[in-house]
Amino acid sequence: MYTTDKLIFRIAFLLLIFISASPNAAAQETDYYGFKCLDFKFEGHDAKIVFPGKAEPGHHWIWRARFWGHEPQTEIALLKKGFHVVYVDAAEYCGNQDAVNLWNHFYDYLISQYQLNSKAVLEGFSRGGLYVYNWGSQNVTKVACIYADAPVCDLRSWPGGKGNGAGSPDDWKAHLKAYNLNEQNINEFKMMPIYDAVKLAEARIPVIHVCGATDEVVPIDENTYVLEKNYKKAGGEIKIIVKEGGGHHPHSLKDPSPIVHFILSHTAPELLDPPTSPESKMAINYRGNIDHCRIKFGNEKKGRVAFLGGSITFNPGWRDMVCDYLKQRFPGTEFEFINAGIPSTGSTPGAMRLVRDVLSKGPIDLLFEEAAVNDATNGITPQMQVRGMEGIVSHALKSNPDMDIVMLHFVDQEKMADYNRGKTPEVIVQHEKVAEYYAIPSINFAKEVNDRILNGEFSWRDDFKDLHPSPFGQKIYFQTIRHFFETSWKNFDSREQKPRILPAKTLDSKSYIKGHFEPIEKARLKSGWKLIQNWKPEDKASTREGFVNVPVLEALQPGAKLKLKFSGTAIGLFITSGPDSGMLEYSIDGAEFKTADQFTQWSQQLHLPWLLMLEDNLQEGRHLLELRISASKNEKSNGFACRIHQFAVNN
């Protein structure tokens, strides 16, 4: 038996041997978001190992390449699943062969010391992409999968700045030195992810990238998309989640679920959370109900359904699917479907043409209204967005208080960018004010599509393709509308519905609630104008259906004048704006003349329908408009022309 002194000496001796032999001799225990972290030196480099509360059976782990602790949400989620997280600082090596050698040693240490899984999950942010791909391509049997975030894949793009990126001169010098390169031989150098990743692809290592669409530091076109092309060509699996409007920062996703799901799918599928349904991402606001039209369709066996909006409504797709659904849902019901979509038009022209294109057809039972895309892209002010949308909703409900209205917010890349910046698009904010005030339901496709793209379900580039959706995108729209119908009518009460009570006053006293068109024949032509019964352009620019071979008031030369007497608070011109559209000068009630430019960003290639609002803050009453063609014009226009289809008045 040992005496007490001998026992103490023996323990101290063994501890000294352990400390002198251990690579993490000066290990310190720290906290990493509630998890135990060991900080130590490994071959002179800072290193870290974070331990889960309880390791999962496979002892899987994720290896952070650079920028320890930055946007750690994926790591935290994996720690909660039982993964380990590791890191060794090799910043000075820039991902070169020295970095690969250090990683080789660190890998051997981790496997032998902690019995971690033989296949690592590699995580590379930004320049960390050089490390994960350079090491992984030399160790394909040791890689489970790769998560790269805005990764550098070509040194020439970053830090070189040889493409569209700004580059970093100091980092460029450091990387050339680290790789023993110069400006002359860099183009022959192949130890870069865009080339080396092929080895991982051939080994069938799955990869996921998360990138910002507008990254100006590490442009996606020069890095991830080049790697993607080569990876797929070599037979590899690569998934890309693109954040529209996103730059180089912030990295990762606020909700790392799709990244975690990808990693678990290729390491420990038994740890996956139950899949979420597409319905969970649908952004439907169930205000009020749509039971009035349900009663009409079911009891009276008649229904009139109108679709008011722009080109996304006008074009075939979701609208046709909704019509087919209603006919199948209510067999034997005689439906009249009104397609009142006109490309390029938003809520203001919608309010002005509501009577002509919709209400004149008879009582409407169900109205779909969309204007969020064109109101935003056409530069309509927030105030006009409310005035136009309220004009449609209020006017429609006053014509038939039993009408059900569904407001739709379709998606475009700018709206997705707003959501990715943590902001609700302005046009949706304004339109939702109207929906809330009149208690009508709305469906926010912009949010749904963006959320589902970030969730990794599909992509904008490959699946949705454009704000005019591909057949895939049209089906997404329809599936959500169908779900809205099914859930709204699930607990349908067939008893007669109570009459709708409209608000006592409007949100905006100048909303276009009495918007309408007045005929061009009402104008008094002073000089230079003529009425053309069947106008069509003489140039080769494209036209819109319904806006050729129709009557227009046309003036082609500066100085042409007309006058119009009207009553109301607003006056505008529904025109065709084409390559030769000029500037207008106008005066209301003898006031000083103001200038309005008819030329739009699309006018060079297209004669497009356009509502040019001149004034919408007038006092109620009779007014006189004086209009003349200016001698000035937009520098992109090749003429001075004005072609008026209708006068738009709010009376």
Image (cartoon, rainbow, N blue to C red):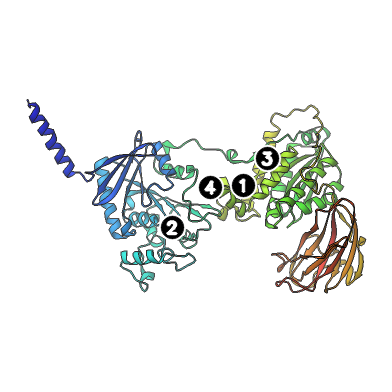
Q: Nearer the viewer, mark 4 or mark 3?
A: 4
- The residue type indicated by label 1 comes to Thr
Question: Which is more toward the observer, 570 or 531?
Answer: 570
Q: What SS does tag 4 mark?
A: helix
Q: Which residue is mark 1?
A: 424
**Of callouts 3 and 2, which one flags the residue occurring earlier in the amino acid sequence?**
2
Q: What SS does tag 1 mark?
A: loop
Q: Position of residue 516 (x, y in %)?
A: 85, 52
- The residue type indicated by label 3 comes to Arg
In the depicted structure, whether residue 41 falls above or below residue 403 = below
Question: Looking at the image, do the residues carrying marks 1 and 4 touch, with CB atoms under 8 Å apart?
Answer: no
Q: Residue at x 83, y 64 (%)?
A: 592
Q: Which residue is mark 4?
A: 454
**Rendered image quadrant of residue 290:** top right
**Of callouts 3 and 1, which one flags the residue occurring earlier in the amino acid sequence?**
1
Q: Which residue is mark 2?
A: 231
**Of callouts 4 and 2, which one flags the residue occurring earlier in the amino acid sequence?**
2
Q: Position of residue 595 (x, y in %)?
A: 78, 66
Question: Which is more toward the observer, 465 or 594?
Answer: 594
- Separation of marks 3 and 2 at Cα, in angstroms: 38 Å
Q: What SS does tag 3 mark?
A: helix
- Separation of marks 4 and 2 at Cα, in angstroms: 22 Å
Q: Which residue is mark 3?
A: 482
Q: Position of residue 99 (x, y in %)?
A: 30, 57
- Separation of marks 1 and 4 at Cα, in angstroms: 16 Å
Can residue 243 be seen in the rendering of this structure?
A: yes
